[in-house]
Amino acid sequence: MPITKLTRAGVGLAAALAALAGAAQAQDCTTKIGAVLPTSVDWGRPIAETAQFAVDQVNEAGGAAGCRIEMVLRDTQVDPKVGVDAAKALVDLEGVKVLLGAVSSGVSMPILTSVTVPGEVMQMSCCSSSTAFTKLAEEGKTGGLWFRTFATTGVQSAVGAKVAKDQGYGSVAILYKNDDWGQDMARLIAADFAAVGVDVTASVAVNDGQPSYRAEVTEALGSRPDALYLALYPAEGTAAVREWISLGGTQNMILANSLKSDDFRDSVGLQYLGETLGTDTASPRSDSADAFRAAYMARFGKEPNGPGLANSYDAAMIALLAMEAAGQDASGADVAAAVARVTDPGGTPVSADTAGFATAKGVLASGGTVMYQGATGDVRFDANGDVSAPAVVWSFTDGGTEEVEFLSLHDVDTFIASLK
Amino acid sequence: MIQNLIDGVLTGAYLSLGAIGLTLVMHILRFANFSHAELLSLGAYAALVCDALVSALVPVFAAKLGPLSLTWALTAAIAASMVLTGVSAVLIDRLVFKRLRDKGQELSMVFASFGMALVIRNLIGLIFGLSPQLYSKDIAFAVLLSQDPLILVKPDQVFVLIAALVLMMILHLVLSRTTFGYSLRAVAENPALAQVNGVNLSRTIMAVWVIGGGLAAVAGVFYGLSHQIIPVMGRDLVLPIFAAAIVGGIGSVYGAVLGGFVVGIAGNLALVILPSGYTPSVPFLLILAVLIIRPYGLFGEARA
């Protein structure tokens, strides 16, 4: 009977197709991870591209936890409201269990408290430095879901105090940006200055977007300090420093890394920045950091010089390693718990590339642990999800900046310990 | 304290110039023009370009005048920028505001002005980049007038103050002594009646834009001379300028002048009373205080 035959053939075909589709699904499943980064600002896009670079390398090694990884990227516009909306969409609609970002502490914080912690999603930031996260973690409010590959503001403020002490400044006035980062910085540096015996004569908040910073500068100038500490961004930093110098303020200045910018140097004028020293956290002088630099050069055709690039790479890589370690269908909390397995100082060392990820897969599958050697060195998180970092003291030159002093991770940790 | 007062007066100079144009437009065209502060940016950048042109063509003019960072080139550039900005203001009116004035309501004008502000600001950012620019890379050092109490004054700012006062005086004479000034006030009072009496309405409106744009250009250059030129300067200045116009009373040129100085001084004195993080609130508190006591501003009058 032709009809029955045809039906049978049809059923058979459908079954075969279904089986095929099933097999394809097992091989080509895709796990989404979220990224909320300020892609609409010029320095934010490379951070996102570097995270995607890590994702691409992992996919070349066959993906993580048996599936290809797709990074769904959303723009924060450096705006907490936009950032929270973006994170919420990623968690609720895309169902991500791992969220990379954000950059600014002021954006990462509301995402952490209102999206990732309630949603039990692991959040790994490349670039947020506020100590408010440390405090939150100490109070147990991050649920162990929060990590960052960027050293806290504490490293930078300690080095700032070290510079003041080494230069022999007796008194310092502070101008700080009136946001989470600036307030944090001002509070920490004031305490660190006090610890090394440097007087803080004034600590003045500067709101950005003001037509004039004359009043703030006058306030800081009134006490006639030996030096000026600046925790500002280039836009208001340029205006404030020019005002400061024109009013006869000292040219002994200590800058936070936010002012390590050619725009700032050019607008203020190099001739006024001769006595200026800046601080910054640094990449370690390690082979793994050099390897990242080479890989970045090969991929993007330029040095990874922007802020947070190495950190962004490590954030993505560690998150994906942890996903691999946690296995398929792991929850955000499982992935967060697995971070310790991939940054274990006693584990098998793995490099930060496709081959390294493939090695890690093998080790993790057999129940072992690995030590990820990344673009920022051997990343080791403390109980609060924080990392420490080596630091540099730098000065401005014709071509950019040059290093004045390098402080290894050990130097930094020793100095910070001496402050307490 | 004395330093803050002096700084306030010096800051007030360019705020006043900006507020005069705003108050004229608000009074005569009867809408709150939020794009007015962008005319300051436009003027500042126009002068930047003209300054570079003149300095390149006539290098002699690039020399500084005495202790000022002002050059003959920049002086010429200011004049050129006044014309350019005035013409731009008229063009913007022709392209956008005139069409809405004929068809739309007051509120659509206000929204259009928000839009214009965004367009101008971003166009400037697109052309000149987002980083700050300067008329002179050198920092003009302040002159120490007194060591205790510490009083420092920058020569540039004194020049700005004097130049602003001279411009205001000229404007005052034009408004109070000429037929043109008379017709301007007539249009503000009652456009229909003024037309019946032979005042050319469209030409008067054009004149208002030219004056407002020209003064805005000077204010923008003076701001740039005192601080820096940056595409978002219009955004940063729009509130203080509005505050000055409202405090002074919409429509009153003298009120705008006084309002500018009041806002400038209040902004600088605020730090003495308030912690530094809260100073941006001062212009708003000032508007509130003035409007509670005098609902039409210091010099304003109610109108039908």
Image (spheres, coloured by chain):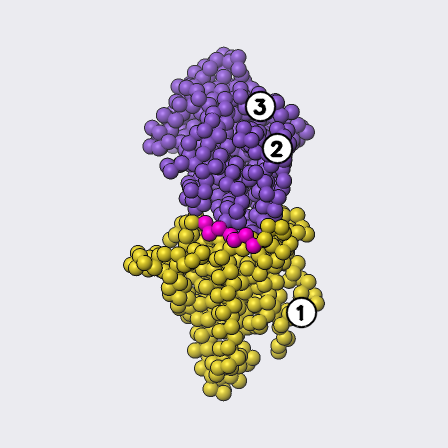
Chain colours: A purple, B yellow
Q: Relative to B301, does residue B267 appear above or below in the rendering?
A: above
Callout 2, which amino acid? Answer: Val
Q: Are the two marked residues, 1 and 3, in contact with CB atoms closer than 8 angstroms?
A: no
User: Any mark on residue B135, and which?
Assistant: none
On the image, numbered disc 3 is attached to which residue? A415
Position of the C terminus of chain A by quadrant: top right
Give the class, few, some or many, for how many residues have Cα within 10 Å of label 2's Cα (few <14, many ≥20): many
- Residue at the (45%, 60%) spot, across then down: B221
Q: Give the left or right position of residue A60, taking residue A146 as reference.
A: left
Secondary structure of the residue carrying numbered label 2? loop
Q: Position of residue B225 (x, y in %)?
A: 46, 56
* Residue B301: image location, x then y, percent: 63, 75
Q: Earlier in the sequence, mark 2 or mark 3?
A: 2
| Element marked by disc 1 | loop
Q: Chain of mark 2?
A: A
Q: Which residues are magenta?
A: B139-145
Q: Is residue B140 found inside the magenta-colored segment of the image?
A: yes
- Element under disc 3: helix
